[in-house]
Amino acid sequence: MKTIYTVIVVLFLFSANVFSQVGYSPRIDSISNLVTLQTLSKLNRELCGDTATMIGGAPYTIISRHSNSVHNPKAAQFILERFESFGLTARYMNYRTNGTNVIATKLGTKYPNQKYIICGHYDNMPSGSLAPGADDNASGTCAVMEAARLLAPYSFDYTLIFVAFDEEEQGLIGSRAYADSSYNRGDSIRGVLNFDMIAWDGNTDYKLNLFSNSASVNFTNITKLSFNIYQPMLDPIVSVGNMSSSDHYYFWQRGYNAYCGIELMSDFHPYYHTINDNFANVKMPYFLKFTQASLAALMTYGWNFTINFVHTPIVASSDTGPRTALVTINSPYAIKKVTNGPRLYYRVNGGAFTSLNYVYSNLDTFRFTIPGQSAGSNVEYYYAAQDSMANFVGTLPVGGKGLNPPGSVAPATFLQYTVLTGIASNNEPETFSLNQNYPNPFNPMTSIEFSVGKQSLVKIVVNDLLGREVVELVNHQYPAGTYMAAFDGKSFPSGIYFYSMYLDGSIYETKKMMMIK
């Protein structure tokens, strides 16, 4: 990664109902997990000169990949020979005397002229005789090479391009040459996955940054969801801005979707651009998961295993009768509709999930009926659907697994509603009130009592410390009376939360509560 002078970061908050969601594929899971500590560490050691490798049929130690080093062309040759050994069409792109990109291609079967690129720069720093660059950026190059190795035997809908860029450290020269030539040819590049420094996690929190621009947010969020599904230990943070310090940048300038996947900027490598950026300082467990997740994301794009659920959540009310739930499901693939068709899973008060088949469908819209529940019940539910060939399953909320039937493994979070308890009284309240939740602190259930002085549209929402809405508990017209809403926090972390009551669209009152697990 070239030296960073200024980075402006804006956090992007993702709404699962707006953008395409990622389906879980057992095939993607199994292929990405073929990256092992052994294969990855051996490759990184070879690239950073920690051990000798074979280049041109002879032993060779790559002690530097600096663009002015005599060893840099040998590193390029090493990458090219590996690409060719995987059975891929590989070539050099000599864009100037001292600059060589290494490129391999896997032609798509349905859309060969539409491309996804996975890339990382192989040149490094410092400029002396020894420059290991194990993290910056042998790590990203390893991810590209492991993707090439493991994906070469498979057919993908879209063309996959594997690129190791040169001269990133001198100002993104290699990637700029590639982006410019692609633009001038009119290439259809659907997205660029750029990985730069993915092997350092100093505090073992497994956080990482996905730097996007505003035009690439939807594209980047598919990677975020892929990471969440296939490597849930990782914590990807999508940041939107104009981060210009890596090889994604000139693809942005040419109007292509792109992002930079990188270790957390606030936990930056302490040996950056020094001779101590060596294999001994690689954080292999983090590096492994980051690489596996990168492959899973690329396969998700290559096969287009995406699915979208459009659903208006059921709102809390005092109605104890059956509830109708509608969902529209869209995917590039046909959705299985008969045996193993879309399902709704629900549970009451934290019990076991019950599976429901849809009772009616019209094109891509499915209707389910959740049985009526007694007052005070908390109902959690999620949707699941699989494609007709049982290649992948999608759930709402995202993260569920299981095929035939779809969604037999629940996601980590759920949609939910409560059946409110209306407390009858001969003396209707004359004023509105929002009471303190009880118990408080709580773990994980708590109740919130509120009074309605006259018929009003009442909404109660829970927000976290950053002001982000966690869940909507109530959104309903209520006659005068006193009511109870329940909040189940088992899917959320410990901490301070705020709940707010809105009357006819205007905020009435906010209170604080604490969950301790």
Image (spheres, rainbow, N blue to C red):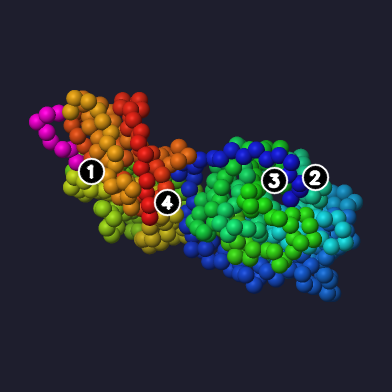
Question: Which callout, 2 or 1, points at the residue further toward the start of the chain?
Answer: 2
Distance of label 4 from label 2 (alpha carbons): 42 Å
> What secondary structure predominates along the stretch shown in magenta?
loop
Other-residue count near label 4 (Cα within 10 Å), few / some / many at <14 / 14–19 / ≥20: few
Query: Mark 1 or 4, which is nearer the eye?
Result: 4
State which region is magenta: 418-428
Q: Is residue 315 visible?
A: no
Which quadrant, please, contains the C terminus?
Answer: bottom left
Question: Which callout, 4 or 3, points at the residue further toward the start of the chain?
Answer: 3
> Are the residues flagged by discs 2 and 1 in contact, CB closer than 8 Å?
no
Amino acid under disc 2: Gly
Q: Is residue 499 left or right of residue 392?
A: left
Q: Which residue is mark 4?
A: 493
Label 2 residue SS: loop
Q: Which mark is residue 403?
A: none
> Are the residues flagged by discs 4 and 3 in contact, CB closer than 8 Å?
no
Give residue 37's position: percent from left, percent from top.
62, 70
Question: Residue 310, relative to residue 80: is it above or below?
Answer: above
Distance of label 4 from label 3 (alpha carbons): 34 Å
Amino acid under disc 3: His
Q: Residue at x 62, y 58 (%)?
A: 201
Amino acid under disc 4: Pro
Give residue 157's position: percent from left, percent from top.
58, 54
Residue at the bottom extreme of this rendering: 58
* Res. 302 image quadrant: bottom right
Distance of label 2 from label 1 (alpha carbons): 60 Å
421 within the magenta span: yes
Distance of label 3 from label 2 (alpha carbons): 12 Å
Q: Residue at x 68, y 63 (%)?
A: 282
Q: Which residue is mark 1?
A: 419
Question: Which callout, 1 or 4, points at the residue further toward the start of the chain?
Answer: 1
